[in-house]
């Protein structure tokens, strides 16, 4: 373990890493229920059972590769948001067959492999200014806290406002708040695995009081349904319509992954003095291979998950935690009833607490310089307000280039930042 993951160098232990991996898995296990339920609505041979197996396999393969090759505590799975775009916009809205949509994901994966091998994705990370990297981590913290609050029903869409406070007297938000209180009490008392105890404790209370029910005839083991292997369609890949879909998949994944890697690595204290991520080439390759594997198995784009911050908050610092998470994803193929029993509101406290832990980089952002502070501010607020990590990066880069240009600091803009500025501008105006 020491040779593979350098535990002592990172001040960690095998036990702590495994607990962190379990915490990460429990906070993102909802994808095993949400992704199949979403894809199962497509019909035409796409079944929820096949999608469940594909989701678990793709997540397991990509996360194991991340752990062994990049040695980073980051888990991967089919992306939320991307799967909704795949299902409701591309297939149900635009009339694409799911086979053709999977072909777009497959080609995207191939492109990502080449971009990763030739360090192009790595160049994107280095092109982001240091203050903006810190802002991305903070923005992601607010974003995942918002996800936690909404998953628990603590924050809801308001009738007279964009968002509002939910009915916290209802069981789900009330239990989530109690779970959060338990988590922070255990954390300040320095109890190991405080986040994991909060998740499991909330789940147990919900079962005891009948809020989470165990189905009749429930068994912890179930046999998997075969995934949809290599169901591609090549007849329409040269059309402009196909290109727009491919580019959207490409854009959503490349910048969601970029933001997640920066945010999680910053929280874990793994970045260097310039904010760069170690072994980022291997991390991007893991993401690319995961996307390829997912497409071949029958699920949309696989991407890095911001819920990995829960595992980092629980002490995860190396790829061993990712290996633990990846193994649990593979085990879930047989033990899906056990993992799917954990309600979403039980994992919400872990996300909210992880959001708090990601606030610290804001103290080191140079807000006195408007050309640094304004882009950082926009990156921070646009992630929760636009409900997208990618949009935070977009508006951060756009404002950075514009402000540096008009203030005569054009030399501080890298070539890659200019390229991103042009791409983001075209995306907005076209």
Image (cartoon, grey):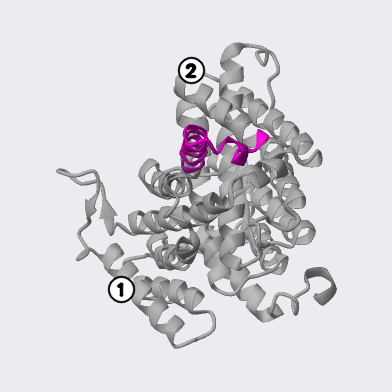
Residue 55: give x, y in percent of width and height. 61, 47
The magenta stretch is 392-415
Quadrant that contains the N terminus: bottom right
User: Does 147 sit above or below residue 213?
Assistant: above
Picture quadrant where residue 293 is located: top right
User: Does 8 sit above or below residue 395?
Assistant: below
> What kind of element bears circle 1?
loop
For label 1, the residue is 209
- Left/right of residue 185 with respect to residue 281 in the rendered view: left
Is residue 45 shown to the viewer in this render? yes
Residue 321: give x, y in percent of width and height. 66, 68
Work out how far the residue at label 1 is from the one at label 2, CA to CA, in angstroms: 53 Å
Which circle marks residue 430 in the picture? 2
Q: Is residue 293 magenta?
A: no
- Left/right of residue 63 with respect to residue 315 in the rendered view: right
Residue positioned 55% across, 73% down in the render: 314
């Amino acid at each position: 373990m020491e040779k593979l993951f350098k535990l002592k160098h990172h001040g960690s232990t095998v036990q702590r890493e495994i607990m962190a991996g379990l915490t990460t898995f429990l906070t993102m296990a909802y994808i095993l229920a949400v992704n199949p339920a979403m894809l199962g609505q497509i019909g035409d041979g796409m079944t929820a059972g096949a999608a469940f197996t594909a989701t678990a396999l793709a997540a397991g393969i990509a996360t194991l590769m991340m752990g062994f090759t990049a040695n980073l505590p980051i888990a991967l799975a089919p992306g939320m948001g991307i799967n909704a775009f795949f299902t409701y916009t591309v297939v149900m809205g635009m009339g694409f067959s799911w086979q053709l949509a999977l072909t777009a994901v497959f080609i995207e994966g191939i492109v990502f492999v080449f971009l990763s091998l030739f360090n192009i994705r790595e160049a994107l990370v280095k092109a982001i200014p240091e203050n903006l990297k810190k802002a991305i981590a903070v923005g992601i913290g607010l974003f995942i806290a918002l996800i936690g609050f909404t998953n628990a029903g603590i924050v809801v869409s308001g009738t007279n406002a964009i968002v509002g406070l939910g009915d916290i007297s209802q069981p789900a938000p009330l239990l989530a708040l109690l779970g959060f209180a338990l988590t922070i009490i255990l954390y300040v008392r320095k109890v190991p695995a405080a986040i994991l105890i909060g998740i499991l404790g909330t789940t147990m209370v919900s079962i005891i009081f009948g809020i989470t029910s165990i189905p009749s005839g429930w068994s912890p083991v179930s046999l998997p349904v075969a995934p949809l292997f290599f169901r591609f369609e090549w007849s329409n890949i040269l059309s402009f319509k196909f290109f727009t879909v491919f580019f959207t998949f490409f854009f959503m994944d490349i910048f969601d992954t970029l933001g997640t890697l920066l945010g999680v690595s910053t929280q874990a204290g793994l970045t260097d003095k310039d904010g760069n991520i170690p072994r980022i080439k291997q991390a991007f390759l893991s993401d690319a291979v995961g996307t390829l594997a997912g497409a071949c198995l029958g699920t949309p784009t696989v991407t890095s998950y911001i819920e990995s911050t829960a595992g980092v908050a629980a002490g995860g610092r190396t790829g061993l935690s990712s290996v633990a998470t990846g193994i649990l994803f593979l085990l879930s193929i047989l033990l899906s009833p056990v993992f799917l029993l954990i309600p979403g509101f039980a994992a919400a406290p872990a996300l909210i607490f992880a959001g708090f832990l990601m606030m610290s980089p804001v103290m080191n952002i140079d807000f006195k310089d408007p050309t640094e502070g304004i882009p950082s501010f926009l990156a921070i607020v646009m992630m929760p307000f636009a409900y997208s990590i990618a949009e935070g990066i977009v508006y951060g880069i756009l404002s950075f280039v514009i402000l540096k240009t008009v203030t005569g600091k054009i030399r501080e803009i890298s070539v890659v930042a200019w390229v991103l500025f042009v791409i983001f501008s075209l995306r907005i105006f076209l």
